Image (spheres, rainbow, N blue to C red):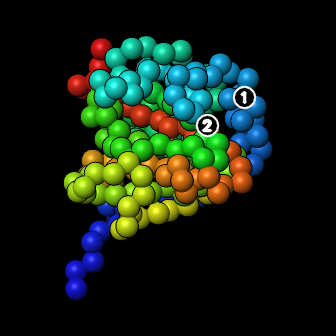
Amino acid sequence: MNQPPDIFSSGAVLVPDFVTSAEEDRILQRIGAAVWLTQLSRRVQHYGYVYDYGGGGSHEPAPAFLPWARYMAERMRPHFAGALPEQCIVNEYRPGQGIGMHADHRDFGPVVASLTLAAAWPMRFRPRNSRPYNAGAMPGDQVATLPRRSLLVLAGPARSAWMHGIDRAASAGEAATRLSATFRTLAAAGRP
């Protein structure tokens, strides 16, 4: 019987302990002191370029990377084939919050890397061509818990042929808030 591929045989890599506990504490302090945007159901911060949640890509400039984000971008270069990430979104997920299943916009480059901070939470993965589409959990979703201080790198088919998300109903049982810092490059099509 042929097993369907899983997210980690499709180009996803989970790097445990990408940052130390002391580095995490410093990053969380810097994030906590920065300005939050509150137009979504969760708080976010955008750096480099704004992420257009309407699906239009990433053309509008955002505030420059703060020193902690520049430092993390430099450390992530090997995961981006030597390129320097140009866009970062910090998301705050409180218990009961999440994000619907999605694949990052094609205006971003071939790699997406997300640093998990403050708490380990599960993330769902689903092949992009799944039918019927459902923003929440579906039977057959692959679920991976992203440990604190870990880096999830999505490249190859894991970036292009899979969706990912955090189910709101499932996150209601989480005991702590998770922050993520997701880094991207811009694809040629996304350049202003």
Residue 147: image location, x then y, percent = 61, 57
Q: Nearer the viewer, residue 149 or 95?
A: 95
Location of mark 1 (residue): 32
Q: Nearer the viewer, residue 144 or 49?
A: 144
Q: Give the mark toward the camera: 2 or 1.
A: 2
Task: Please report contact status of discs 2 and 1: CB closer than 8 Å, yes or no.
Answer: no
Marks 2/1: CA distance?
A: 10 Å
The answer to whether any part of residue 191 appears in the image is: yes
Residue 92, disc = 2
User: Which residue type carries mark 1?
Assistant: Gly
Secondary structure beneath dot 1 equals helix
Q: Earlier in the sequence, mark 2 or mark 1?
A: 1
Residue 150: image location, x then y, percent = 59, 52
Residue 149 vs 191, above or below: the answer is: below
Residue 160, disc = none
The answer to whether any part of residue 15 appears in the image is: no
